[in-house]
Image (cartoon, rainbow, N blue to C red):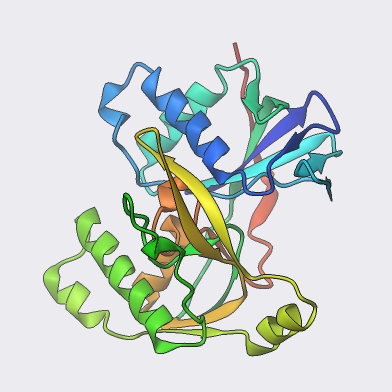
Amino acid sequence: MRARIIFSLKNRGAYVPFHHQYLLAQVIKGLLIFGPQKSYLDFNQYNFSGLKGQTKVSRKGLHYFSSKVTLVFACPDKQFMEYFLARLFEQREVIVGNMHLIPESVEEEEPVIISDESRFLCISPIVVIPAAFNDETGKKFVSPESDEFSDLLYESTLARMEALGKYTPEQLASFYKFQIVADHEYIQRIQASHKKFARIYPLYDNDVKFEVRGYTFPFTLYAAREVQQFVYENGLGYCTHKGFGMLDVANNDSIQRAPQHDVNYA
């Protein structure tokens, strides 16, 4: 299940760092730690985007000037999704950076039909190499147009699919087709304009700060339909439960406004 969570922004003009995935991860973890269901403390089968809204960039970060701010959240476990949303809407407001957000409503995304060839957009950065303590390997640059880039993401995807326990060894063995083809024109255009599609992002684990390199660019994925569906619903790459690797299908209006659920908070 994927849903868009809509917040009212109490203090318009407030800001968060440009790279604010770690702030959102801390809020989500806090909701789980101080919630009644202790069985979810180590649950990590979820994925989320950055905050979306009308923004302006300054030296401080991203300033939000829209009255509404949204967050895309995804999880294949319906029970966890319901629990998380209930915990979120118990809060009168949620503080991210110096933004004061009031949970307002939830809009479910319509299911997306994906084939064995799909064009994806990154709505949060993809991490290809995991972070490690006292090791800067996670910041290494890997060209998105190289076989190494596809190979690293194939390994992480198959490992996560195996850990989920929903696929047989025979199914996993059949998922050998996996190739990412980056949008070459997009990458050239970004480089020509002296902008970046790969940046260093901070994240925290057990109160330890790590840094990883994340990539944002359009690409086409050639893989089995089951693999395509998995990365769409669970994210692509490492640190997906830290807000990395969320994808959307290009030219797809997946969020419909009809199935909207208003939730009363405390």
Give the residue at x 55% y 60%: 125
The total of numbered circles placed on residues is 0
Q: Is 26 rendered above or below residue 213?
A: above
Instruction: Tell me: residue 183, above or below residue 261.
Output: below
Q: Is residue 116 visible?
A: no
Locate residue 16, reporting x and y percent. Answer: 70, 38
Above or below for 180 versus 228:
below
Q: Is residue 164 visible?
A: yes
Which is more toward the observer, 236 or 119? 236
Measuring from the top left, give residue 18's x and y in whole percent.
69, 48
Name the spot of residue 180 as percent of width and height, x first.
47, 82
**Residue at 35% in and 71% down:** 226
Which residue does the image show at 43% across and 53% down from the upper left?
240
Q: Residue furthest front?
A: 134
Where, by quadrant of the figure, is residue 237 drawn?
Answer: bottom left
Image coordinates for residue 69, horizontal then vertical, percent: 74, 39
Front residue (pair 59, 203): 59
Q: Quadrant of residue 188?
A: bottom right
Residue at 64% across, 24% down: 95
Tell me the quarter of the image containing the C terminus.
top right
Is residue 11 shown above or below 253? above
Residue in front for this viewpoint, 222 or 209:
209
Seen as rendered, the residue at the extreme left is 169
222 left or right, relative to 48: left
Q: Quadrant of residue 225?
A: bottom left
